[in-house]
């Protein structure tokens, strides 16, 4: 049952935090609701989920047509790749956008946020594994991008995000999570590290993740 699955995930997060000498309260669980029904999303919220993450703007808008979900106090995050032409809807919909990977996108988000007098919170996505199939700024270009975005009045960079490679052993992705934490240490004011998914979130938490994005382990 979903409440048991969520409780089990929270216990695993707490254990990983204990191993790394951190309080469990410092890690936010983001329930990834891609391809899930509105009924499943509402069940997750009823089971204690406070943050949901969507991969596509249109799917999020479709689900928000549901009055129960729309009235909930849940925080909505954009975790998938975002194109500039979706910026207008994105700033109207999401509390936090995890996947900003270029100044062009940040500038368009800033433009659209200004129109509705909003300060849009974002994370900068970093391709720590250098995989051609993944989005994200290169690690050596991160500092310059963050500095450039800092000049935008309606955008606030809260932290960094990365997606680790799919592997058979979570230990193999530890270096990529560690890399993101090391990058965080070089830039003041970045408090959030969004890293870790169903197959590797415990390793991510051990390496400093403050936000884990979990779908399959919740919606079993």
Image (tube, rainbow, N blue to C red):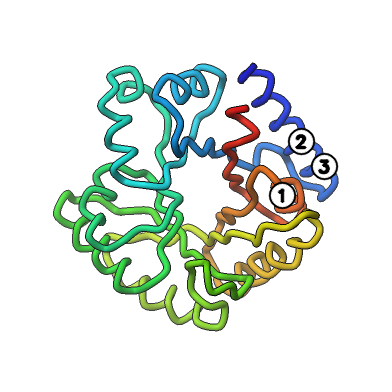
Viewer-closest of 94 and 22: 94
The local secondary structure at tag 1 comes to loop
- Residue 116 percent across, percent down from the top left: 16, 49
Query: How many C-alpha atoms fall within 10 Å of the one at disc 1: few (<14), some, or many (≥20)?
Result: many
Residue position for label 3: 18
Going by the image, does 213 lie left or right of 202? left
Image vertical order of residue 81 relative to residue 57, above or below: below
Q: Earlier in the sequence, mark 1 or mark 2?
A: 2
**Measured Cα–Cα span from mark 2 to mark 3:** 10 Å
**Measured Cα–Cα span from mark 1 to mark 2:** 11 Å
Q: Earlier in the sequence, mark 3 or mark 1?
A: 3
Viewer-closest of 59 and 6: 59
- Residue 94 percent across, percent down from the top left: 34, 44
Identify the image quadrant of the N terminus: top right
Query: How many C-alpha atoms fall within 10 Å of the one at disc 2: few (<14), some, or many (≥20)?
Result: some
Front label number (2 vs 3): 2
Going by the image, does 195 lie left or right of 62? right
Residue position for label 2: 12
Residue position for label 1: 200
Image vertical order of residue 60 relative to residue 7, above or below: below
| Quadrant of residue 153 within the rendered picture | bottom left
- Residue 28 percent across, percent down from the top left: 59, 40
Q: State the residue at coordinates (81%, 48%).
A: 21
**What mark, if any, has residue 132 been given in the picture?**
none
Viewer-closest of 191 and 40: 40
């Amino acid at each position: 049952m979903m409440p048991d699955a969520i409780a089990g995930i929270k216990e695993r997060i707490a254990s990983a935090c204990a191993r790394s000498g951190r309080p469990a309260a410092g890690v936010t669980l983001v329930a990834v609701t891609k391809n899930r029904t509105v009924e499943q999303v509402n069940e997750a919220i009823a089971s204690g989920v406070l943050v949901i993450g969507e991969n596509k703007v249109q799917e999020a808008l479709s689900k928000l047509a549901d009055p129960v979900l729309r009235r909930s106090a849940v925080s909505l995050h954009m975790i998938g790749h975002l194109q500039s032409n979706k910026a207008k809807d994105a700033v109207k919909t999401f509390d936090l956008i995890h996947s900003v990977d270029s100044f062009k996108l940040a500038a368009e988000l800033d433009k659209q946020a200004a129109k509705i007098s909003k300060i849009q919170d974002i994370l900068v996505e970093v391709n720590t594994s250098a995989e051609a199939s993944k989005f994200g700024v290169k690690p050596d270009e991160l500092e310059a991008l963050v500095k450039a975005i800092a000049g935008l009045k309606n955008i606030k960079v809260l932290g960094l995000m990365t997606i680790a490679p799919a592997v058979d052993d979570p230990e193999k992705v530890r270096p990529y999570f560690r890399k993101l934490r090391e990058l965080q240490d070089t830039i003041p004011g970045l408090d959030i590290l969004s890293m870790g998914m169903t197959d590797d979130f415990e390793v991510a938490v051990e390496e400093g993740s403050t936000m884990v994005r979990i779908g399959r382990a919740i919606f079993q």
